[in-house]
Structure formats: C-alpha cells, structure tokens
Amino acid sequence: MRKLVIDNEELFGRVVELLKEGREVTIPSKGFSMLPFIRGERDLVVLERADDIKPGDIVLFRLDGRYILHRVMDADGALVETMGDGILQTRESCPRRQVYGRAVGILRDGKRRVDPNGRWQRIWVGAWWGLLPIRRWLLAIYRRLPWNGWLREQYKQIAK
C-alpha cells in the first residue's frame, strides 16, 4: 500500500474548514500520546465540530503551531486543559477557540468503529486516569505484549 504524504498545515487547514462547516471528518492518527486507546499509524479518528466539550472528550486543538489530539481533563472557562492517554505528566492548556473537533468515533484498524464517549469507554478511561501513578509501568508492559509488534517497530523507526 502506498502512502500519500500531505503537509500538516494543508491537511489540517482543510480539516478545520470542514469541521467549521459542520461536517464529520475522519483523520489518521499518528504518534503514541493516546495509547492505549488510540494507536498511531493504525487507527482512524472520526471528528465533529467541538461545540460542547467536557472532561473525558478527545479533542483536536492547535497549540504552538501544532495540531494535537488529546483528552480533555478540564474544560471550565476560556481555557481547556488536555493530556494524552499515553502521557505520564505533561498537560497542555489552550484557548477554547482553538479546539476545533471532538472525537465521535475511533476506527480500529480503519474498520471496527468504537464510540469514545460510550459507557464502557468512559469506564476504561476513568480507570486509566486513576492509574496515572503507575501508568509508566503499564505502558512499558503494553509495548512489550506479543501482539504489539507493530508498536515496537514504530519505536525502532523513531530511534533511528
């Protein structure tokens, strides 16, 4: 399968336009910051316009010139605080006006749709938040599971 590489500014500029029009947009995921719930280079994320956001939502936002997909930790006031599920400590704050999309679906392997706001997902996410103090070790174990060979390969490519 051939990959088409598109400049992030061009891609996300168009994504933001479509979201502002009220359209649903599906984007590929990249990176490891949302492990274990979204796996980069494998899962697709379905977004809608971020009209109403609340803690636990996965949102697309722009911060320091980069587009990021992370989970909302706090959405009170003019600032939205986010953190990736695979991140150990760092939280980001961005103005609410720079939150463009909210995830309404995750396509596992680009096929099976999972509702990120469904009851069971919310339960898993709540448990994952509670495990923050030991998340480092859980992610280390997760990366070494036999069926995560693709993940080890991604880490090897980054290390080069």
Image (cartoon, rainbow, N blue to C red):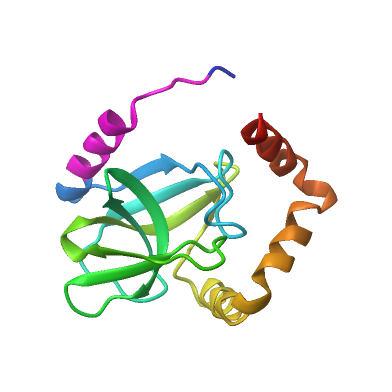
> Which residue of the protein is positioned furthest toward the right in this rendering?
146
The number of numbered badges drawn on the structure is: 0
Residues 57 and 63: in front is 63
Horizontal and vertical percent for residue 119?
Answer: 51, 77
Residues 120 and 160: in front is 160
Give the image quarter of residue 74: bottom left
Q: Which residues are magenta?
A: 3-18
Residue drawn at 60 percent across, 76 percent down: 132
Magenta includes 13?
Answer: yes
Horizontal and vertical percent for residue 151?
Answer: 70, 43
Give the image quarter of residue 93: bottom left
Name the main secondary structure of what is drawn in magenta: helix
Residues 55 and 32: in front is 32
Magenta includes 34?
Answer: no
Vertical placement of residue 62 versus 102, above or below: above
Answer left or right for 152 relative to 63: right
> Which residue of the protein is positioned furthest toward the top in this rendering?
2
Residues 117 and 90: in front is 90
Residue drawn at 57 percent across, 49 percent down: 32
Quadrant containing the N terminus is top right
Horizontal and vertical percent for residue 10?
Answer: 26, 29
Residue drawn at 68 percent across, 75 percent down: 134
Quadrant containing the C terminus is top right
